Image: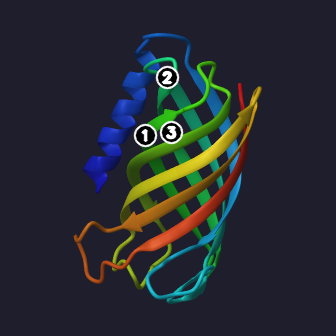
Amino acid sequence: MKSVLRVSLTIVLLLTLWHPLGAAENALSVGYGFALWSNWHRAGRTSEGPYHFTQASYSYERPLSQKWLIEAGPFLAYTWRPTDGIDVGVNLGLKVYPFSRDHSGFFVTMGTGGAYSTIDFVEQGKHAFFILQGSVGYRYKNFFVEDKFRHYSNGGTAWPNQSINANIINVGMYF
C-alpha cells in the first residue's frame, strides 16, 4: 500500500512539472460524506454503526485535450462516526466535460488512489486502502459542486475484504 501512495505522489509531482496543452488549474473543496451501499448495511452505516465524515481536498488539473483533464491531489477527512478518526489519501484520475470545450458546466470524473485511516474498520481488517471513485458535478466560473462515490478496499490483502463505500457531497473553488 505504501508503494501505491509513493507512486501516486510521484505522479502528482511530475504533473506539476509538465506543461502540455494549457495552464493547470488548482481547486480546493470541502465536503460531507456518509456510508452508502456498504455491503448489506443500509445507507449511512457500516457494521460499527453510522459512518459520517467531513473532508477537505486539493485538486490539481492538467488538460489532456479540450474536454479531458488529468486530475490529482490529496485529501484529508475527519470522521466522527463510528469513532473519531482521520483518513489521509491521494487520488489520481480523469475528468471530462462532455458538453463543453471551455471546462465549464457538467463534468464526470473517475479515478483511483490510496488512503490510510486511523479507524479500525471491521470490514477491512487493516488501515491502508485502495480507492476507486467516480463523480458527477457542475462548474460555474470558478465554483463547483460535486457528488462523489468512493470505494475503499484492501484489495484482498487482508481478511475480511468487505467494501467501505461513501457518498461525498463537495463544494469548491478554483484558483
Q: From the top left corner, tell me how far across and down residue 133 is, in percent.
A: 46, 54
**Mark 3 or mark 2, which is nearer to you?**
2
Rendered residue at 42%/16% (across/down) = 17
| Quarter of the rendering occupied by the C terminus | top right
Rendered residue at 70%/55% (across/down) = 31
Q: Secondary structure at mark 1?
A: strand
Picture quarter containing residue 154? bottom left
**On the image, numbered disc 2 is attached to which residue?**
62
Q: Nearer the viewer, residue 38 or 124?
A: 38
Q: Note whether 170 is above or below 82 in the view shown.
A: above
Picture quarter containing residue 153? bottom left
**Mark 1 or mark 3, which is nearer to you?**
1
**On the image, numbered disc 1 is attached to which residue?**
93
Type of the residue with mark 3: Gly
Type of the residue with mark 1: Gly
Residue farthest along the front direction in this orientation? 99
- Is 70 on the left or on the right of 108, as rendered? left
Neighbor class of circle 1 (other Cα within 10 Å; few <14, some 14-19, many 20+) is: some
Closer to the N terminus: mark 2 or mark 1?
2
**On the image, numbered disc 3 is attached to which residue?**
73
Are the residues tagged 2 and 1 within 8 Å (C-beta)? no
